Amino acid sequence: MSSGYHCQSCGEWHAELPRAWGVETPLPFLLIPPEERAVRCLWDAETCEIDGREFCVRGCLEIPVRDGSEPFSWGVWVSLSERSYQRTRELWTTPGREQEPPFFGWLCTALPLYPSTLSLKTLVHTRPVGKRPFVELEATDHPLAIEQREGITEARLQEIAGALLHGPSPGHE
Ligand SMILES: [Zn+2]
């Protein structure tokens, strides 16, 4: 079955429905002036440490699609305690690390299409080596938390995809 769809935003047929969208760095990092980052931050594609006191990891905030197969995955960053962050790094290549109890984390990515997603409370579930952690939002009435809890329809997924492809522009808070 093709994953193509008729786009409500532009009226065209798109060959592929995006199933993931994310950002490369956490928001606190983006707030550091670019010329200071090399001195104040230690980062790679998966982890980011700022001023030795803010500790972020990249994860997947997955939204189940009720009438589809794969979930939609928002690529987000969460801020952990220093202890949880060090533990995460310690376990990076340890087989069976998914046995680790979840870590508490603050969402530190401003996702488009929702009321502010900054500082939502999460649980960060470690997954097998090579897989980014699963980010579970606290069960509140925030629209993103509701979507994660209840799942979305394929139609809503197309609406999200359309907005990501054609605007509104991301990053509003
Ligand atoms: Zn379109």
Image (cartoon, rainbow, N blue to C red):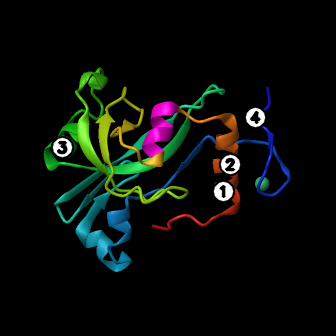
Q: Is residue 147 one of those drawn in magenta?
A: yes
| Amino acid found under the numbered disc labelled 2 | Glu
- The reply to whether callout 1 and callout 4 are in contact (CB within 8 Å) is no
**Residue ID at (64%, 34%):** 153
Quadrant for ligand 1? bottom right
| Number of the label disc, if any, that sits on residue 3 | 4
| Number of the label disc, if any, that sits on residue 86 | 3
How would you classify the magenta stretch by its main secondary structure? helix
Tell me the crowding category of disc 1: few under 14, some 14 to 19, or many 20 or more residues within 10 angstroms, Cα based: some
Query: In this orientation, which residue lies closer to the viewer: 86 or 60?
Result: 60
Mark 3 secondary-structure assignment: helix
Mark 2 secondary-structure assignment: helix
Mark 4 secondary-structure assignment: loop
The percent position of residue 49, horizontal first and vertical second, equals 25, 57
| Amino acid found under the numbered disc labelled 4 | Ser
| Amino acid found under the numbered disc labelled 1 | Ala
Q: Earlier in the sequence, mark 3 or mark 1?
A: 3
The percent position of residue 134, horizontal first and vertical second, equals 39, 35
What residue is pinned by disc 1? 163
Q: Is mark 2 within 8 Å of ligand 1?
A: no
Q: CA distance from mark 2 to mark 3?
A: 38 Å
Q: CA distance from mark 3 to mark 4?
A: 40 Å
Q: Earlier in the sequence, mark 2 or mark 3?
A: 3
Q: Nearer the viewer, mark 3 or mark 1?
A: 1
**Quadrant of the rendering where the C terminus is positioned:** bottom left
| Number of the label disc, if any, that sits on residue 159 | 2
